[in-house]
Amino acid sequence: AKAYLDAMEKARGLNAYVLETPEQALAMAARADDKLARGEGGPLEGVPLGVKDLFATEGVRTTACSRILDNFVPPYESTVTSQLWRDGAVMLGKTNNDEFAMGSSNETSAFGAAVSPWLPPGWSAEEGKRKLDDARSAGKTPDGFLVPGGSSGGSAAAVAARLCPGAAGTDTGGSIRQPAAITGITGIKPTYGRCSRWGIIAYASSLDQAGAFGHTVRDCAVMLNSMAGHDPKDTTSMDIAVPDYEAAIGGSVKGKVIGIPKEYRVEGMSAEIDALWQKGIDWLRDAGAEIREISLPHTKYALPAYYIVAPAECSSNLARYDGVRYGERVAGREITELYENTRAAGFGAEVKRRILIGTYVLSAGYYDAYYVRAQKIRTLIKRDFEQAYAAGVDAILTPATPSPAFGIGEKGGADPVEMYLYDVFTVTVNLAGLPGLSVPAGLSSGGLPLGLQLIGRPFDEETLFTLGHAVE
Ligand code: GLN
């Protein structure tokens, strides 16, 4: 824990942590030492972790990286993090994320962008360090650096920069798999219902799911074993036994049927992503898997459906931030003015945009045209996957992102849709409630990490760990 706290201090320019918790870390580590000395302790005893600032942590400021929760200290602990601490993990701090997990680059955070430890092609390490220190001392956005992805960008940057060996994140449309892929680490988003959402600040409740970042597939398996399990406090958490995920590592790939969905060969996909995908196919074939081309015909509607369903749910979930019950309050002459002032000052531009879209698609007259249609598309997307699995497919292999990491400030300025398009390979998985694993699979021509995504059957994370380990 001490070594990681030191590393965190030296790497503050990355803005990976929005809160460091050295006192908790050292106290938890000391308790872990005692247990280990007695020959006791859980599967994560003494393992230091970063926690996305979307998980409520008892007595520790939790903001979802929004100004509206500036001063919020939860009086309770999320189920997922309490299970990590139960198993001996040590909290190093809260990691940066896009505000309320809305974003693909960590640039919408009220604490400013998190920075990828991977430098833009051609930069030397010294140059990178100097520019980062300069930007930090000037209080400026480190333009020119690369994004770590989002929304769990701080968790990914922290693991990639060795500021923790693993981190907890959440994934609503790709927020674990996408940042993992472009920072060269591993990330698992389990099946919807596998982990409890209790105590996780809600973005889009029918899509949100907790998951883990690690250096290896095994690290993710061990973490997920601790995070998963039924919780009566979340009605969507499923009472299904959690298998020993670590035991799935090293399992045989022979005879597994891997689906390659032709609709994921999207227009404008770069040759190097195509080549990476082919490499993944070859690795699995060489390991004894059967490769089968499949069709998921409604894939092209996933992104528009997601960007209706997610904002609709967010507009409803974020109605609670009214300046009365908790968080920031900006006074007004009357209660409605207090609401307006608080929400105007407390939410950032992207969150406001999502609330506007969400209330629009839910309003009378538009509900059937947008929201109901998006839900119908969601059913069709789910059915596409069900048909592939019913025909014997064990898992599906796709690229994780359409390109390597982009630069801070490069996307999403005048045209927010440009940013939304970056989620093209990940949102289908959330719409269908399936598990997805992102594994590092190589470097781009510019030397930046690229990832492959494995999509599994519901509650079959084990196959993903087996296959992921074979390709990592
Ligand atoms: N980028 C997507 C969004 O902004 C997904 C974010 C997430 O998974 N939390 O909605």
Image (cartoon, grey):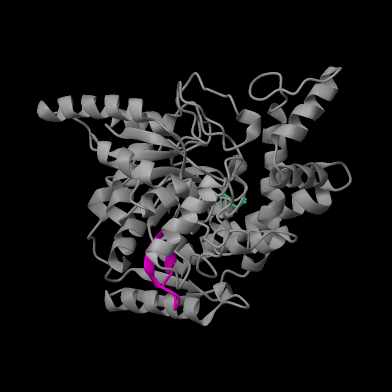
Judged left or right of residue 11, residue 89 is left
Q: Nearer the viewer, residue 429 or 17?
A: 17
- Give the number of marks: 0
Identity of the residue drawn at 44% across and 57% down: 130
Q: Is residue 272 above or below residue 221?
A: below
Residue 448 covered by magenta stretch: yes
Does the rendering let one see residue 400?
A: yes
Identity of the residue drawn at 70% across and 33% down: 346
Quadrant of the drawing holding the N terminus: top left
Q: Residue 115 placed where, x, y %?
A: 49, 53
Q: Residue 402 placed where, x, y %?
A: 55, 69
Q: Nearer the viewer, residue 292 or 41?
A: 41
For the stretch drawn in magenta, the main secondary structure is strand
What are the residue bounds of the magenta stretch? 437-455
Q: Residue 310 placed where, x, y %?
A: 66, 47
Residue 118 covered by magenta stretch: no
Does the rendering let one see residue 116?
A: no
Identity of the residue drawn at 75% across and 28% down: 342
Judged left or right of residue 174, residue 248 is left
Q: Is residue 459 above or below residue 26?
A: below
Identity of the residue drawn at 56% across and 34% down: 201
